[in-house]
Amino acid sequence: MQHVFTRFSRYSWVALCLLLVACHTDMYSQPKYQPNDPSEFFEDGRANRPPVPNTVALGNYEADPAFLTGVDAAGELVSELPIELTMDLVQVGQVRYNSYCMPCHGLVGDGNGIIAQRGPIVVPSFHTDRLRSIQVGYLYDVITNGVGRMYSYGARVEPADRWAIVAYMRSLQLSQNGNFDDLTPEQQQSLESAGGQ
Ligand code: HEC
């Protein structure tokens, strides 16, 4: 036995050491792309993948406090949407509202959602003078941070979608507090003729 071991040491230790030294290069020299290498795998022939839309270069992020928090640089709740009001925005808001808020606040924001109907919680209506005249920044803040017994949605709804929900809440408020005079003459006419039938 000792004979075998001695022979092994004599002839093989050096080779074994070389093998072990070589081991660490396995990962290092594996096939992989270096930055800016060409690639036949992707259609554009580049190994680098373009950054996803809205990627901000490191060190170039300029936070817009009004957009992100609903409070402007002077510390005041904003009273105008910090995002362009379009039909698309309101429609996105409708989808998000119906997913996140409707179960409690109801389809039209009267606080009569299915959870409110079945559960022990009392959910307020959006159709009060106070909430109709409150700054949009306040509504945004309620979604972001929650209020009283209402949980915050900041972690689940991204800022642009929160503003979309605010825009939709404003349209719900209008829809429940509308006036005949708000309609265009054509709409008034078609309503009158529908009513007369
Ligand atoms: C699980 C039920 C539930 C959900 C879901 C929910 N809310 Fe509420 N919300 C409440 C309750 C309860 C209150 C009353 C909180 C209090 O005053 O203690 C409330 C209050 C409010 C108020 C009134 C705040 C005030 O000052 O009177 C607004 C505005 C509001 N919620 C908006 C939303 C929006 C927008 C969403 C969706 C992003 C939403 N809520 C989702 C239960 C809910």
Image (cartoon, rainbow, N blue to C red):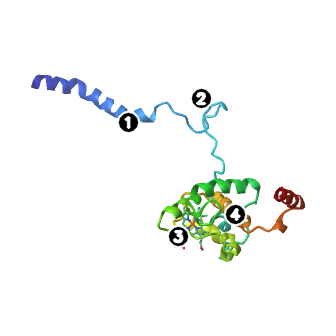
Crowd class of label 3 (few under 14; some 14 to 19; many from 20; radius 10 Å): some
Q: CA distance from mark 4 to mark 3?
A: 20 Å
Q: Amino acid at mark 3?
A: Val
Q: Kindly report which numbered mark, 2 or 4, lies closer to the viewer in this rendering.
A: 4
Secondary element type, mark 2:
loop
Dividing the image into four quarters, tell me where ligand 1 lies.
bottom right
Indicate the quadrant where residue 49 lies. top right
Q: Which residue extends farthest left?
A: 1
Name the one closer to the observer, 31 or 174: 174
Quadrant of the rendering where the C terminus is positioned: bottom right
Secondary element type, mark 4:
helix
Indicate the quadrant where residue 158 lies. bottom right
* Label whose residue precedes the other's in the sequence (2 or 4): 2
Q: Kindly report which numbered mark, 3 or 1, lies closer to the viewer in this rendering.
A: 3
Name the one closer to the observer, 119 or 197: 197
Q: Kindly report which numbered mark, 1 or 2, lies closer to the viewer in this rendering.
A: 2
The residue carrying mark 1 is 24
Which disc number belongs to residue 172? Answer: 4
Q: Amino acid at mark 2?
A: Phe
* Label whose residue precedes the other's in the sequence (2 or 3): 2
- In the depicted structure, whether residue 17 falls above or below residue 56: above
Cβ of mark 1 under 8 A from ligand 1: no
Which disc number belongs to residue 122? Answer: 3
Residue 172 in sight in this render: yes
Residue 124 percent across, percent down from the top left:
58, 70
- In the depicted structure, whether residue 89 falls above or below residue 5: below
- In the depicted structure, whether residue 151 falls above or below residue 6: below
The residue carrying mark 2 is 41
